[in-house]
Image: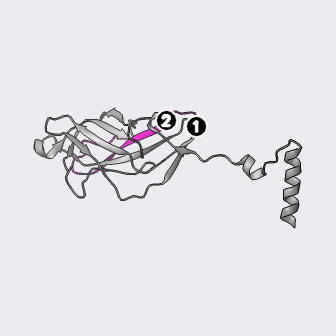
Amino acid sequence: MKTKMTTVALAAIVAAGTAAVPAVAATAKAAPTRCHTADLKAGFATGDDAKPEMGRTGKQTQAFIWFTNKSNRTCTLSGFAGVDMVGAQRTDGTWSLARSSKRPTKITLGRGDTTDFSINLLPVARSTPQKEKFVPATFLVTPPNETKHFTLKWPFGGQILKQDGATHPGTYLNPVGQ
């Protein structure tokens, strides 16, 4: 009986020209959708505390790449960026970095907000034989779940132990936000 009374009351309101919208529906906002490459800008973190120690050979160090939301909307990032290192030597080619075993989390970016992710690197000495070292020149960085990439010039110098075919390389990337 209660349902019938509510239906009759709503029908009377609609017939009078006033549409009733439940309070929950009126105040609900759409959840942010994922960030697209066009929504973002990217770069290497180059502050003194963010620079990888490329002269510290034989021990891992980290470089950080940031994404900033340049759009007028809130958006989310979740997962791993795609990172391909392009080498400076003829023998380097392109190295697609492996992912760590860390679990990604969802990051929400409002307009102007920034998040980053780290790349673990294993630097080697200049005296390392050429076939064992990779000399980075540029990084092709694709945001999670996107196909368009940013091209970032490697600003730090140094060489990395070439392990592009290794099962557990010393150079790999972590999820966005970690």
Image coordinates of residue 95 in percent, x first then y, are 24, 44
Per the image, the residue denoted by label 1 is 73
> Crowding at label 2, few (<14), some or many (≥20) Cα neighbours within 10 Å?
some
Q: Is residue 63 magenta?
A: yes
Most common secondary structure along the magenta stretch = loop
The total of numbered circles placed on residues is 2
Q: Is residue 158 visible?
A: yes
Disc 2 marks a residue whose amino acid type is Asp
For this rendering, which residue is in front, 160 or 77? Answer: 77
Indicate which disc residue 16 carries. Answer: none
Name the residue at 11% across, 44% down.
131
- Asked if residue 68 lies in the magenta stretch, the reply is yes
Q: Which residues are magenta?
A: 49-72
Q: Nearer the viewer, residue 35 or 152?
A: 35
Where disc 2 sits, the SS reads helix
Q: Is residue 42 left or right of residue 165?
A: right
Q: Is residue 108 left or right of residue 152?
A: right
Q: CA distance from mark 1 to mark 2?
A: 9 Å
Mark 1 Cα-neighbour bin, 10 Å: few <14, some 14–19, many ≥20: some
Q: Would you say the residues marked 1 and 2 are in contact, meaning their CB atoms lie under 8 Å apart?
A: yes
Looking at the picture, tell me which residue is in the foreground, 27 or 7: 7
Q: Position of residue 170 (x, y in %)?
A: 25, 53
| Residue at screen point 78% across, 48% down | 21
The disc at residue 39 is: 2
Q: Tag 1's secondary structure?
A: loop
